[in-house]
Image (cartoon, helix red, strand yellow):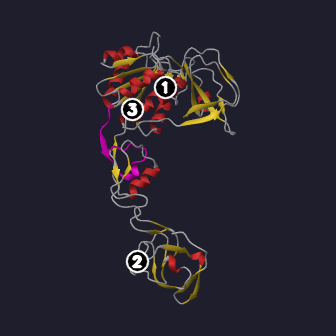
């Protein structure tokens, strides 16, 4: 039995990068960039007006100004602004030569045909300078970035219309156990509906990986082995739930070993999630997760998700929040690292979720985060600030 930290390091150090592919920009959100992207131009590409107004010389602000031209966005000026001259300009248009500021239209008055006067007391430049945001050939998005909508906007602005990204991870999901039936079925007194598979499929979709469901493997070594081999042949990562503990029908680890999966660990010194298995082949990864839904959910978040991002070239840092505890918390058993479910209250505090064990699906549905409670820690006082991993 090893610590969670050891298990995490084993999982991450086993990662090998996936192949890459180009995708259309509109399909790139949630993908991991596989090559640095550089700007193909200055941004803005010209001195760009920040507002509707008049472009003129600052030294002429106290004088009557002759309007020599009107420039709309998307047009280039054709005349240079000289002494006591100005150009009417729209937001986003190019500043004409000779002008060094834009006066807001609200601070001007028309005093004759093509004549205006500035009525303000002073003005800012009110234009963005060429290359102020980005210089041509400047690095704008780094390899390994998990692309979010704001990155898509940036890629679009520099011509990154077909970014090179890591391929999506294909993840197979297998549930084991003759007691399981699908959600569409009515369980007999000795059966339960299969929630783990659909929970995992949703978690996989949430991180923009590609889930493949291989169904329920009954408690039969031959059937289970056949399904595992099919999943290994088709997927990058295979996740099995159940069949990894110490019961008479928990034969998954033996099947994996028989099929040349090198088991790197089988038990973790954590709660919940102790019977967690991880193994590798030359190019595949296999997780055996506990059959209890809470354990299964947490182990995916803590171990599987970081590996998925790692093989795509992204170093995953879990979103973390730092909030005070709403009331005192005590526990009796403190012999191992415990993943506690917490929820965020409306007043900006944390509450531990009432929890009846790792099969308590309803408790998990009320959780907003996971707190890692260290061994030997038996109580936390109200008001203490805790780092919580958001889920």
Q: First in sequence, mark 2 or 3: give its number.
A: 2
| Residue span colored magenta | 16-34
Tell me the mark number nearer the camera, choosing from 3 and 1.
Answer: 1
The alpha-carbon separation of the residues under discs 2 and 1 comes to 61 Å
* Residue 265 location, quadrant: top left
Near-viewer residue (378 or 333): 378
Asked if the residue under mark 3 is in contact with the one under mark 2, i.e. CB atoms within 8 Å, the reply is: no
Q: x and y percent of residue 350 in the render?
A: 65, 32
The alpha-carbon separation of the residues under discs 3 and 1 comes to 15 Å
Q: Quadrant of the C terminus?
A: top right
Q: First in sequence, mark 2 or 1: give its number.
A: 2
The alpha-carbon separation of the residues under discs 2 and 3 comes to 56 Å
* Residue 143 location, quadrant: top left
Name the residue beneath numbered marker 3.
Answer: 171
Tell me the mark number nearer the camera, choosing from 2 and 3.
Answer: 2
Residue 22 is inside the magenta segment: yes
- How dense is the environment of label 2, judged by Cα within 10 Å: few (below 14), some, or many (20 and up)? some
Q: How many marks?
A: 3
Residue found at the far top of this picture: 248
Q: Main secondary structure of the magenta part?
A: loop
Q: x and y percent of residue 125 in the render?
A: 51, 69
Name the residue beneath numbered marker 2.
Answer: 77
Q: x and y percent of residue 49 in the render?
A: 48, 70
Residue 299 is tagged as: 1
Q: First in sequence, mark 3 or 1: give its number.
A: 3
Q: Is residue 139 visible?
A: yes
* Residue 334 location, quadrant: top right
Q: Quadrant of the N terminus?
A: top left
Near-viewer residue (218 or 132): 132
Figure check: 44 above or below 197 = below
- How dense is the environment of label 3, judged by Cα within 10 Å: few (below 14), some, or many (20 and up)? many
Residue 147 is inside the magenta segment: no
């Amino acid at each position: 039995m090893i610590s969670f930290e050891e298990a995490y390091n084993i999982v991450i150090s086993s990662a090998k990068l996936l192949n890459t592919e180009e995708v259309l920009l509109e399909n790139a959100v949630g993908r991991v960039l596989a090559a640095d992207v550089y700007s193909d131009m200055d941004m803005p590409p010209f001195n760009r007006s920040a507002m509707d107004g008049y472009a003129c010389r600052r030294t002429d602000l106290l004088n009557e100004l002759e309007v020599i031209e009107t420039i709309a966005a998307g047009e280039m000026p054709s005349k240079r602004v000289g002494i006591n001259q100005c150009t009417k300009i729209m937001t986003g248009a190019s500043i004409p030569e000779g002008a060094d500021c834009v006066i807001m239209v609200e601070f001007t008055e028309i005093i004759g045909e093509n004549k205006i006067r500035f009525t303000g007391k002073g003005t800012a430049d009110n234009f963005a300078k060429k290359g102020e945001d980005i210089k041509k050939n400047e690095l704008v998005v780094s390899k390994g970035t998990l692309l979010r909508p704001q990155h898509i906007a940036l890629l679009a602005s520099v011509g990154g219309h077909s970014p090179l990204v890591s391929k999506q991870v294909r993840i197979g999901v297998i549930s084991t156990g003759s007691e399981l039936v699908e959600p569409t079925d009515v369980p007999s007194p000795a059966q339960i509906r299969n929630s783990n598979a659909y929970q995992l499929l949703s978690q996989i979709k949430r991180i923009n990986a590609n889930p493949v469901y291989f169904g329920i493997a009954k408690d039969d070594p031959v059937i289970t082995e056949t399904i595992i081999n099919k999943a290994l042949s088709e997927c990058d990562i295979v996740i099995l739930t159940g069949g990894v503990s110490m019961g008479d029908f928990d034969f998954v680890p033996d099947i994996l070993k028989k099929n040349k999966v090198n088991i790197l660990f089988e038990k973790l010194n954590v709660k919940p999630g102790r019977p967690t298995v991880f193994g590798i082949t030359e190019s595949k990864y296999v997780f055996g997760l506990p059959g209890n839904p809470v354990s299964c959910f947490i182990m995916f978040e803590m171990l599987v998700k970081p590996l998925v991002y790692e093989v795509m070239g992204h170093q995953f840092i879990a979103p973390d929040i730092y909030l005070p505890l709403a009331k005192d918390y005590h526990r009796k058993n403190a012999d191992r690292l415990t993943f506690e479910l917490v929820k965020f209250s409306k007043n900006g505090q944390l509450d531990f979720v009432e929890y009846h064990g790792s099969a308590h699906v309803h408790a998990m549905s009320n959780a907003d985060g996971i707190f890692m409670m260290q061994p030997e820690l038996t109580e936390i006082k109200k008001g203490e600030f805790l780092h919580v991993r958001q889920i």
